[in-house]
Amino acid sequence: MLDARRFATSRRDLMQAGVTYPISVLLIGLGALFLLVNVTALSIIRPRADGSIWLIFGAWLLCVVIGELALTRILPRRDPLLFPLVMLLCGWGLIIIERVAPNFADRQAIWLVVGVAAMVITVYMRDLIALLRTLRYTLLFGGLLLLTATIAFGSNPSGIAGAPALWLEIGGLFVQPSEPLKIVLVVFLASYLAEQYTIMRTQRDRFGTAPSPRAFAPLVLMWGLSMVVLIWQRDLGTAALFFLVFLTLLYVASGRTLVLIGGGLLAVLGGTAAYLLFGVVRLRVDAWLNPWLEADGRAYQIVQSMMAVAAGGIFGRGIGGGLPTVIPVVHSDFIFAALAEEWGLIGVVAALLCLALIFMRGLRAAAALRPFPALLAVGLSALLAIQSLLIIGGVLKLIPLTGVTVPFMSYGGSSLVTNLIVVGLLLRLSSGDHARAVST
Amino acid sequence: MLFQRETGRLLVALAIAFAVMAAAAAYWAVNGADGILRRPDNPRLFELEAVARRGAIVDRHERPLAYSEPINEGIGAAMRRNYPEPAAHSALGYFSLRYGTSGVEATYDTELRGSNALNDLNDLFESELLHRARVGDDVMVTLDLDIQQQLAAHFADLRGAAIVIDAPSGDVLALISQPTYDPNTLDADWDQLVETPGDPFFNRAVQGRYQPGGAMQTPLIAAALLSGIGLSETSAGGAAPLMLGALTLPCAGAPPSAQVNGDNAPLAITLSDAYRFACPAAFAALTERLDAGTIDTIVAAFQLNTVPTLPGYATGQAPTAIPTNDGVTIDDGDGRDLRLENALGQGTLVVSPLMMARIAAGIANDGDAPEAHLLRAIRAANAAPDAWSHAATTIATQPIATLSVARQLQALMRGAVVNGAAAAADQPSLEIAGHASLAYTGDDALVWFIGFVSVDAEHRIAIALVIENSDDIGLAARIGGEVLGAAAAFTP
């Protein structure tokens, strides 16, 4: 029966199986049209002799077509919105990178191919989720080992002395271990909490007792891990992301508001300590509180980013019509400012809607699942959403800057491949077809 | 269903967070235009200037003197300002994104830049939605490229200035200041130019403050005519070199009467000959005969104590140390009587070529000096090729002399060309009138030439030129004559 559904390929079979085939194709078509218009405009405004912009678009088209075909074949009952939305953001990101930093676009296109392949493989391995759960301690150990290795031997591809050393160089390829570590941590926490949540919840009604160490031990552990990342790597973004995602998962599993209060206090404590102890954190917070004092110095990036957003206005300057290139590393952390300048508020709202929809569809996948897959879906969706909010909030001066990427859009191979694997996992979870080995 | 309450709350919380992001973006997008985008460190302001198509500057026959053209399309687009006529460089000033504007480019900057005004829906569509670059108005100046080229060719290796004015219209037909600079390569040359001796950025024709020297003889002889002193009255020793302080001031030309009188004879000379040959001693004697009030009257009438304005150029401060209403008599610094020094153009009174050109044009125009101006017409951005809107055509003149005095001065100046120090200015078949003279500044000499030519019954063209570090009076007269000769072919 399962095999029959897995390989159901006739249209009638698919419809019977509840496959919303047309909507994903429609979305992909609309996305492709949007990108085609922009690619055409960019190729007119700035003709590149090698025509590489069309190669990049071709690569994206190949990814989206083959990805959709493969997903339909492997997973007919998946969420129909996730893949088209993710691919739209990936393609949009590629075009922005091509526009603001053409030298990085070719590499990013290759990473997209790798990432979509990784996503398809993730989806194809139907027992992967069960396997992840089984191997959670091994994975966690491996992940922490990788993190330790980064702390010890890390480097920065830019080669600038003093730049955060968040990368490991493996055979000429720079990998950011904190990216795959995100998945490992979410898998670990989901499986831990899937075992503990009933106990946490039954303790809820006990009156006047101290919080259970079952709830607080992992909280303190994760806080400690975040602080290690912050202290040793000066990676404010990853530390904040780890901690917030964990807090979310713990709250969802335990159902205790107290967790949020305690976590909030710990975050404030850690944040204050970090502000007092680390120059990099103090810089970010100072530049956030009053960027105008040092608009041409330490706050240059954030001031230029706000100017880009303001210059975009409601309708945007149009692709190639703005000046987002004055923002340092605009193709990575500040890609959203470039989007705001050239696509305007309309583009910003569209991209935010895509990200929010991806999050909602991910959460939706959690419904009607058993505890581990449900928590996994919540954790992975929250991972994408919180990461988006952290960097976009920073770019818009709502919160201090944290150096994380905009999922699917920013330049960065590790980040793109990791996030596409997350999407693969969410797609698999959304189909509900992973249950065989997953019990409890 | 598991965790329903918590996931529901999480969904709401993060949905609110996303909405807050959108609201923040909306705040900057709507509020930024009047706020942070106006900050001077917004690189977009510079970019806006770089891509704007500045209006062209054309001469009176629509020959381009300055225009902007795109050097790059699309991303990284920019405009380059071209100045195709080297002859006109010193007359135009410059436009530079880095160093700003000067000269004509500065005076008509508002028009040349164009406005951001949104007059109709089409403007709104073009600027707010399509983000088309701003386009400026074209400016037509009164300069005539042919005359300008003549002048520039003569001044190529000289230091000094000249200005050619049409009477009675007051149109500036040509203007030059040497040394100058190439506005095409201003950004690259700037550091070197600011170090260049002689200050190439200084417009000598308008802002120059030169010793008038013998150029004061024209107002002085006008004062003599006003006082009823006859032009044939003889001045004993009037042709001899004059000792004024440490200076020895000889005649600019060689008067025939001086040759006749021989070596030790008192070099007597008539006033008209003294003017023709620019002999200072005779004018020193004249100054002694004239009362101070007459000299002050003539200085005021010839507007030697006011700064002339020439729209198109900064005029700088008032000429040095001339008490505006006290005339030339008293130096208000230490109360010394500088009447003689100032009357001979070797005192505190200094003049610009523009001031002298106005006097020449006033004499040529029978006593009414036209107000010089440079703007001829403006054509709105993107208007039809012939849609020039001409500047006000009313001719503003200032009376500087009566008709009879002006006519006598015309005859004297004609005489100086026919047989006098300005003989080199003579051109066959043309009635060129002029006066060439010398002035001294420290160890250096200047030569002045002022003159005019009749084009037709009511139409004259006047010139004033000064050559620095030179006592070659023939050179000044020859340049003046040749430029006037070229200008005589001019049709307005």
Image: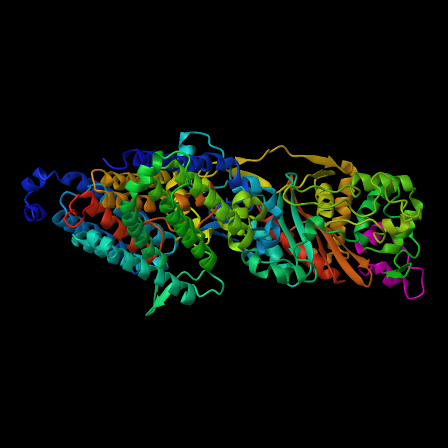
x and y percentages locating residue B119 in the rendered image: 46, 30
Q: Is residue A382 magenta?
A: no
On-image quarter of the C terminus of chain B: top right
Q: Is residue A371 left or right of residue A263?
A: left
Q: Nearer the viewer, residue A380 or B136?
A: A380
What residue is shown at x 41% (from left), y 39% (from top)?
Answer: A260
- Chain part drawn in magenta: B250-277
What residue is shown at x 44% (from left), y 45% (from top)?
Answer: A395
Q: Is residue A128 above or below residue A77?
A: below
Q: Is residue A379 left or right of residue B257?
A: left
Q: Nearer the viewer, residue A181 or A373?
A: A373
x and y percentages locating residue A69 in the rendered image: 14, 49
On-image quarter of the N terminus of chain B: top left
How many numbered marks, from 0 up? 0
Q: Is residue A81 left or right of residue B355?
A: left
Name the outermost residue toward the bottom.
Answer: A171
x and y percentages locating residue A410 in the rendered image: 36, 51
Q: Is residue B271 magenta?
A: yes
Q: Nearer the viewer, residue A229 or A325?
A: A229
Q: Nearer the viewer, residue B17 or B246?
A: B17
x and y percentages locating residue B208 in the rendered image: 72, 51
